[in-house]
Amino acid sequence: MDTAKCPACGCRNFYVKNPEDEFEIHVFTCENGEVCFDEEINESASPPPPIEDETETFCNSCAWHDRFQKVKIEFK
Ligand SMILES: [Zn+2]
């Protein structure tokens, strides 16, 4: 089991914004390259959007954000 970490601060929680409502976020971790949404952290009631390599991904604890592809690269 390996979990992707933020390249800036090492936090393991990331989030993406809902493409239809940027104030709605979906928190997830990336374990062994698999996206795992944390339903307990998520405030949103709507289903999470699909996360692709190009999806803008934000760190849950610092200002880092980049394409999801970067998160996967960090995970080794
Ligand atoms: Zn961070």
Image (cartoon, rainbow, N blue to C red):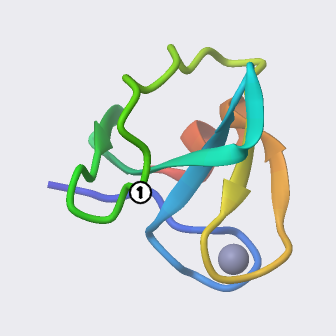
Which residue appears at 76% of the width and 78% of the height? 8
Residue assigned mark 1: 43
Residue 48 position, x and y percent, is: 43, 26
Residue 52 position, x and y percent, is: 61, 15
Q: Is residue 46 above or below residue 24?
A: above
Q: Decide if ligand 1 comes within 8 Å of the CB at mark 1.
A: no
Indicate left or right for 31 with 52 as reference.
left
Q: Quadrant of the N terminus?
A: bottom left
Please state which amino acid type lies under the numbered disc 1.
Glu
Helix, strand or loop at label 1? It is: loop
Badge 1: residue crowd in 10 Å (few <14, some 14–19, many ≥20):
few
Ligand 1: give its quadrant.
bottom right
Residue placed most toward the observer, 7 or 67 = 67
Residue placed most toward the observer, 32 or 50 = 50
Residue 25 position, x and y percent, is: 59, 48
Count of marks overlaid on the render: 1
Q: Quadrant of residue 20?
A: top right
Which residue appears at 74% of the width and 31% of the height? 21
Which residue appears at 67% of the width and 18% of the height? 53
Q: Quadrant of residue 47?
A: top left
Residue 23 position, x and y percent, is: 74, 49
